[in-house]
Amino acid sequence: MKKIFTKILLPLMIVLGTGALSSCKKYLERSPLTDIKETDPYKNFRNFQGFTEEIYNCIPLLSVNQAHNSINLGEDEFWNPLEQRLVSYHIDNGNYFNWTGVLYTFLGTDGSGASNTDNANKGNLWGLCWYGIRKANLGIANLDKMTDATQEEKDLIAGQLYFFRGFLHFQVMQYWGGLPYIDQVVPTNNVIKFPRLSYQATADKVAADLKKASELLPSNWDETTAGKQTLGNNNDRINKWMALGFLAKNYLFAGSPLMNRESTGSSTYNTDYCKKAADVFAQMLQGIESTQRYELAPYSQIRDILYTWNKGGLVPGLKENIMHEGMSGINNRWRYNQVNDYRPIVIHSSGIKVYPTANYADYYGMANGLPIPDPEKADAESGYDPEYPWRNRDPRFYNDILIDGEKCVTNGSAVGNNEFRQYASLFTNGLMRTADGNNKVWTGYMNSKVVAKNMNNVDGTGLPENNTFALSLMRLADVYLMYAEATANGYGTPQSIAPGYSLSAVAAVNKVRTRAGMPGINTKFLGSTTSFMSELRRERAVELAFEGHRFNDLRRWLLLTQRPYTQKKAIEFDRALPNAQVYADPRNARVRNFRETVLFERQFTDRHYWLPFLRDDVNTYAEFKQNPGW
């Protein structure tokens, strides 16, 4: 622990302690910085906001350029299986200590000497969070020095600082569990002996800060006097709804089975925390709906939530996005690595390749709203038929997943009129399934949620400068689904409604499904919270696919170590129609010998529910405990 804070705090203390060098002025030229008074950074809103702005740069960039988008660490994706530079490789193999050392990681320090240091540092969730917490504490300790300011301005500064202190602790504890809660400025020469709290005790501290932030922050900065100075450029500034959203999410996580087990020994949902989460989500949704500050995007624009193409670098999100990952200080959002990874080398000649697993594609059920019980067997109730595995599926399947026979190169002459390069050749022994060694399409599916169907670098659609991606840390559809989970488990049934709001748990899920053109949850799943949760978990898998949520969801539900969630599968099949017919209507193409095979199975035990702390840190003092099994 001492190593953590000295590494993070020492550079900042050196900057702030510049005045201590005054005794050397007879040897050195006098720096203009020596004219800055100790109170200058805090004296008025403009100065203090400048101090606070740096913490925005500590919001982790989970899809950092260096990370090759290695953020989906559940059973959702299969990467080149020999690519040991990826954090996903080490997570799959249970080697969690490598969070500190692999090149392409968003969790910890990059020890590779990567040249793109700005982007690499932006992916350092661990280091950035502790640095931001330190800076938030410095700001809070100096709030009384903000004398030349209105009450509105004082509230804006304080609200941001309390938000960041709570939010950044929450970002760390999702992965490592309960923490020492650092809510004071710690002198660098002190021996740090803050006790490590349980998860729920840490969550209570986070909640106090986020609640205070929600009471101080505005709904919309554009409607404040101070915010009018930057009118139209305030969308990503921390507001009331962000504070309430993460306050409620913090409570939901604290009430989830993994976190409840860590804190109390019980592997069930904690009703009290779920009620707290439901009540805050209800307050948030009621306010958002009445003000229309955020709205579900029309499904016709669903791609623009995460990804824009050929729009001059326009940041995606629409009004559905509540909070982006850390975009400040990052240029060339999709140049180089990330634009390269989603298509095989026969149509995109660089990158480390990654593809959706077949078992994850199975979560996208049928257009009638029913799940697929077994993808290798026909099911009369849902209408699924393995001879037509892509017929009548959830509309989101066709948006998110590229299937066999779909066009993936616009200009056929760009690939020498080779039909197996112009159209996805994903059948067994197809070109894209056999070429390129370990970069081949292992799973039989390709991702089309975070890139366009025709993403490639052979006919110009894959030019990096034309593509922009931004991951949402929280968007409105996610809020509706979290409200449903918290309400059903806090208040007891799928039909329960949290006080002060109009939607039941099931109605909130159906609101998201309706946006996608799907019917509501079938009544067969509404007889108990247990059966309802099976569909709600599937809905989260589909709606939030490839957005970085799945690993934490499986962990908090205590499913990470359980089959089938440990498996990553591929599909095998033969085409049963002439190629021209497949290309004309791939969704309704008939196949033969459809089956799924296991590519990899994780050998996880209970210790894999939490990331380990560095051994040097936990050996610093007895009160700081390592996670079990590490």
Image: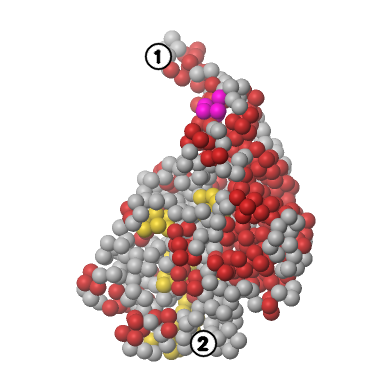
> Looking at the magenta stretch, what is its main secondary structure?
helix
Where residue 230 appears, as percent x and y from the top left, is: 48, 36
Q: Above or below — where is 4 with respect to 463? A: above
Q: Nearer the viewer, residue 124 or 236?
A: 236
Query: Where is the N terminus found, in terms of image quarters?
Result: top right
Dot 1, crowdedness within 10 Å: few (<14), some or many (≥20)?
few
Q: Is residue 47 magenta?
A: yes
Residue 132 higher or lower than 306, as above or below? above
| Residue picked out by circle 2 | 385
Q: Which residues are magenta?
A: 44-48
Q: Nearer the viewer, residue 136 or 235?
A: 235
Q: Residue at x 61, y 55 (%)?
A: 289
Query: What secondary structure is marked by label 1?
Result: loop
Screen quadrant of the C terminus: bottom right
In the rendered image, residue 152, in percent from the top left (x then y), is placed at: 61, 32
Residue 39, horizontal then vertical, whole percent: 57, 21
Which residue is painted at 21% across and 72% down in the image?
413
